[in-house]
Every structure is written in C-alpha cells, then in structure tokens.
Amino acid sequence: MSAVAIEPDWIVPVDSPEIPRGVLVIDSGKVEFVGPVLPQRFANIPKFRLPGIAILPGLVNAHCHLEFSDLSRPIRSTGSFTQWLSEVIAVRQSQRDASEEERLESRRKAIHAGVRESWLAGVRFVVDMVTAPWSQRWVDEANLACLETLSPFARKTFVPNVALTVLPCVELIDVNRNRGDQTELLATQLLKESIGPAVEKPGLAPHAPYTASMALLQRAAMRAHTEERLICMHLAETQEELEWLQDRSGPFASMLEPYMDQMFRSRVGTINSHIQSLSHAWRALVVHGNYLSKQELISLSRYRNHMGIVYCPRTHSHFQHQDHPAVKWNDAIPIMLGTDSRASNPDLSIWEEICWASNLMLSLSPKQIALMATTGPARFLQVESQVGALRAGCFSRLSAIDVSTSRLYQSPAIQSPAIGSNAIKAAPNTSVTNTTAMLSDSAIRSISSTELWESMLDDGAIKPLESLACFQLP
Ligand SMILES: [Zn+2]
C-alpha cells in the first residue's frame, strides 16, 4: 500500500461541513478516507502535516476559450459588445498571413499556457469552446508539462492520471455556407478522434443565436441527445443580441450583414425557441444568460435536471451588464461558474471568480457560491468521481488555499519546527522554510466556519495541493 495521511488545518468539502484538523488518506491519486480522526487501519501509514492550509475539491471551470490564453490582458470593453467582438475576431485573424506551421505553433502555445495557468489555480476540469486548429495532443503535452514540475512523491501520491481534464466543445457557426462547412468538418474530425485520459467526450457548441442558425442548433441538439454529449451555447448575453433577434436591427445587423447568407437569415429563432431546442440535448449549458426574461428563466427551470446556466462573474463585470439572474434563481436552475476567456478576464482562476461573486451576490453564502464551481458542475456533468468532490472513493484532484498569511495567523501559538523539520518538498523548486506560522489544534477548532471562509476569500492564496511543502510527522 502506498497510502499517506495528510493533515491540513482544514478540510473543506464545500458540500458538507468543514473538518478542522481533520485527516485525509490518499492512495495513488484516490481519496480513501476523509474525517476528523485517522482510523486504526491506517495507523502505520506515513503522516504529513500541512500547516496553514485548507484543502478543497478540485475546481471546475464551466466555460472557457483556452485558445485566447496567450493574451496578456483583456480586450477593452468600450460599452459596445459588437466592437469588442470585432476586436476578438481581429486577434484571431491577425495571423492570417502567417504560415500554417506558425499558426499551429501559436495555437499550441496558447492551449499550453491556458492548461498550465488553470492547473496552477487549482482548476482540475475545464469546459472549453474549441475552434480549428485544435489537437488533443496539445492538451496531453500541457498536462505532462504540469506533472514534470512535481516531485516523484507528489506525483505518485496526489495525481490520479492527468493533471487536468479538458472537455472540448466544438464551436459551430453557419452564418454562411462556407463557415458552416468548415465548422462541421472540425466537429466530425474531433468527435470521431478525441477521447483520452486528459480529454472528456467532446461536446457541441453552436456559438450564439447571431452566428448559429436554428437548423444548426436543432441538428446539434439531436446529436447531443442520441450520443449523450454536452451542448453549450452563448445565449441572451447582451441587449444588442436581443435587439437583433427581435427585428434584425441594432449593431449586430450592420456587423453581420456582409457575412450572412439568405439561408441563415431565414432560420433565426427567439431566445425561447433556443431554450426549447437546447433542452433536447443530454446536458445543455446556457452560457451567460444575462438578459433572460422571467418567462425564459421559468421555462429553463423546467429542464433543471439537464440544463443549467454558466455565470462568468468577472467577465460579466467587464461588460458592466445588469445584475445576473443567478442570485435569484440559484434554487431553481443549476448555476455554474466560468471564467470565459482572457479576452474578457485577466486570468483563468475560478477561485478568483468565487471571490468576486461573493462580493456581488451578498444574499448567497460563500459556500453556496463555491458549490457552483465544485460539486454543482461536477454532479451536473456526471464527473463527480473525478473532480469537484472531496470524499472517499473520488480522485484526489484537489485544490488548496494557503491561509497562513491571513488574519487567522496573526498571533500564532506555535512555529512549525514544533512538528519536526522534515519537510517534503512537493515540487523540486519549492523553497521550504521552517518558520511557517502555526495555530494550535485548539485554536484551529475555535475558528468558526464564517471566519474561515472570510479569511480564505479575503487573504487566501489558491495553490495546487500537489506542489505544497508538507512536514512528515514522526
Ligand atoms: Zn464564451
């Protein structure tokens, strides 16, 4: 048996109460036990202490476009969504004159950067919208590169198979016949070829009502139904989109006019007809849904067993949209958190989305918001044994919040040498000091759940559990 016991200051399963000074038994990437006291059957396994750390489930990013992960800063929003979208398209087309090889290399680098950044931010599962070129191999390579930063001990103990899983959803667009053929081709290739340890069964992503016709959506939804695939669609994201759907007017009309063909023009639906079509899929995610009406939300809630909304808090703020319906509809519709891409967000940290949303959605507890990025999406996507949950039987794809520099540790009772100085450097390049501030067990147990969550959100730093230094207990 290669099991080890890990003792952080807190275990935070999110969907059940926190366990102060609890213990977690992990064996070759799988959680064997979680509880307040180590059972007798594990008495002889090596024990490691993680002072100043709260362990959480691995985080789920329910909406991203990893292909923009090489952008150094978000594209400015000037108040016009179509203007922003034109700039995003310009970024995509800026390499039109580059050679095929250069374009592939640049895309590969962006996917690598996105996987690495997500992994470092405790994200262990990403629903990614993909466009051509895309390769499963890039995700596999990026995964390996993450694992190569770990010590053999950390890799063997904590990592089940891969660092992070990507669920690619192929973007489908048919504003004209040519675009339709291109995206169908990528979909056919990708749905046939991709699946492996780092890649989940690909889904489908009719882009948005202004780029994907009702005919395309219906075909994709039926396919997602018969083949049990996820379908995602940007829907009711902006006022401009509603305006266009209503009578083909507003900024989208002039933006789309040069590209749209007659076939597309005759097959545009309403927000409600999109919801109805999406409801045929095995699982459907309405991305954003910022401007869904009460009636549309009621209609969506009827399908709550297999339909949900992805709320991207910082992207939402980037565009200064009206308040998101997630606050009021959290009990009626599954709400999940996403980052969207670096074209509208400074980074790909879902933990930062939880922190941001907790300042905006004051009627919800931080735990309710954290559920939207852990057990909530994991259960919805039926990947709970892989990610998003912290309980016996699940993969040990976990994240960690370092609270050692938070206000909780202002007057520490003990310094770490008290538990022995035999620190295991989880990552070879981690510097380990023996002056880590520690709280006594009784001090940890006296801290309330509310105080802990406030400290995690205000002063905590998200880190990959696999790269932390831990102290071996005698
Ligand atoms: Zn998006």
Image (cartoon, rainbow, N blue to C red):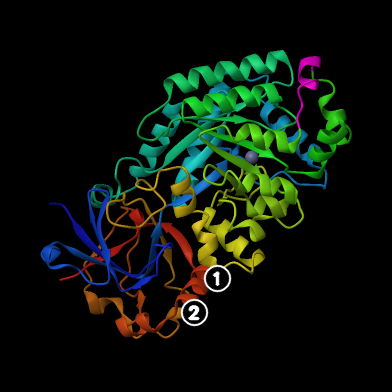
Residue 317: give x, y in percent of width and height: 71, 55
Q: Where is residue 342 in the image (x, y as percent from the top left)?
A: 62, 44
User: Which residue is more in the foreground, 134 or 145?
Assistant: 134
User: For residue 235: magenta?
Assistant: no
Q: Give the range drawn in magenta.
A: 261-269
Q: In which quarter of the image is ligand 1?
A: top right
Image quadrant in which you'd find residue 244: top right
Residue at screen point 48% across, 53% down: 376
Instruction: Please give left or right for residue 128 compared with residue 211 in the image.
Output: left
Q: 400 or 361: nearer the eye?
A: 361
Is residue 123 at all visible to an observer of this figure? yes
- Where does residue 39 sit, x and y in percent of width and height? 17, 67
- Quadrant containing the C terminus in the rendered view: bottom left
Task: Give whichever of discs 1 and 2 has the lower sequence position.
Answer: 2
Q: Which of 325 and 99 is in front in this view?
A: 325
Q: In this view, does 466 lie above or below 415?
A: above
Q: Answer above or below: position of 216 versus 384.
A: above
Q: In which quarter of the image is residue 67?
A: top right
Identify the residue at image location x=68%, y=18%.
Answer: 179
Q: Name the residue under label 1.
A: 458
Tell me the kind of residue under disc 1: Asp
Type of amino acid under label 2: Arg
Q: What crowding class fits label 2: few (fewer than 14 Cα within 10 Å), some (14-19), or many (20 or more)?
A: some
Cβ atoms under marks 1 and 2 closer than 8 Å? yes
Marks counted in the figure total 2
Residue occupied by mark 2? 407
